[in-house]
């Protein structure tokens, strides 16, 4: 069973940066997709960024040019570098894991809160 543990959230001023990390354990599928969703109060959970094990990345339009997703397959860790943060980026950020053999996400992290405020 895949387990995901996020870290790196916190309070940052507008224009600042944060880096989120998500460490995975129990991965049996080498071919997979990992990434980040976020959910702000009163909003639905939305996909922020994702990356396949082969390296292809995708981003939500709202974060393109500001956020960078990366992963270290040897460490089974995915990262989200968030730059030029805006108050509207405030949300709980959730890491996820999906084997490419499945069409649905098979594991979620518990989430880490990112607050962008002066």
Image (cartoon, rainbow, N blue to C red):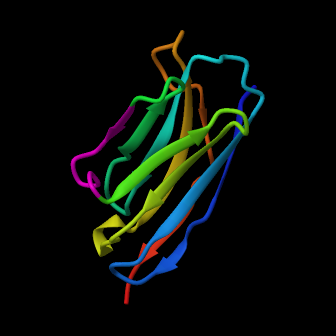
As displayed, is residue 15 above or below residue 58?
A: below
Quadrant that contains the C terminus:
bottom left
The kind of secondary structure the magenta stretch mainly shows is: loop
Quadrant that contains the N terminus:
top right
The front one of 9 and 64 is: 64
Residue depicted at x 50% and y 23%: 54
Residue depicted at x 37% and y 63%: 41
What segment is highlighted magenta in the picture? 57-65
Residue depicted at x 48% and y 60%: 92
Residue 36 coordinates in the image, percent (x, y): 47, 45
The front one of 73 and 42 is: 73
Residue 96 coordinates in the image, percent (x, y): 55, 37
How many numbered marks appear?
0
Residue 43 coordinates in the image, percent (x, y): 31, 55
As displayed, is residue 41 above or below residue 94?
A: below
Residue 46 coordinates in the image, percent (x, y): 34, 45
The quarter of the picture where residue 82 lies is bottom left
The front one of 42 and 20 is: 20
């Amino acid at each position: 069973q895949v387990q995901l543990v996020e870290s790196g959230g916190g309070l940052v001023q507008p224009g600042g940066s944060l880096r989120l990390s998500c460490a995975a354990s129990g991965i049996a599928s080498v071919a997979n997709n990992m990434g980040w969703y976020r959910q702000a109060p009163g909003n639905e959970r939305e996909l922020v960024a994702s990356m396949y094990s082969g390296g292809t990345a995708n981003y939500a339009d709202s974060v393109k040019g500001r956020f960078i997703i990366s992963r270290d397959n040897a460490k089974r860790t995915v990262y989200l570098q968030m730059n030029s943060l805006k108050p509207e980026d405030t949300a709980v950020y959730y890491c996820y894991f999906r084997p490419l053999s499945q069409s649905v996400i098979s594991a979620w992290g518990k989430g880490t809160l990112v607050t962008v405020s002066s």
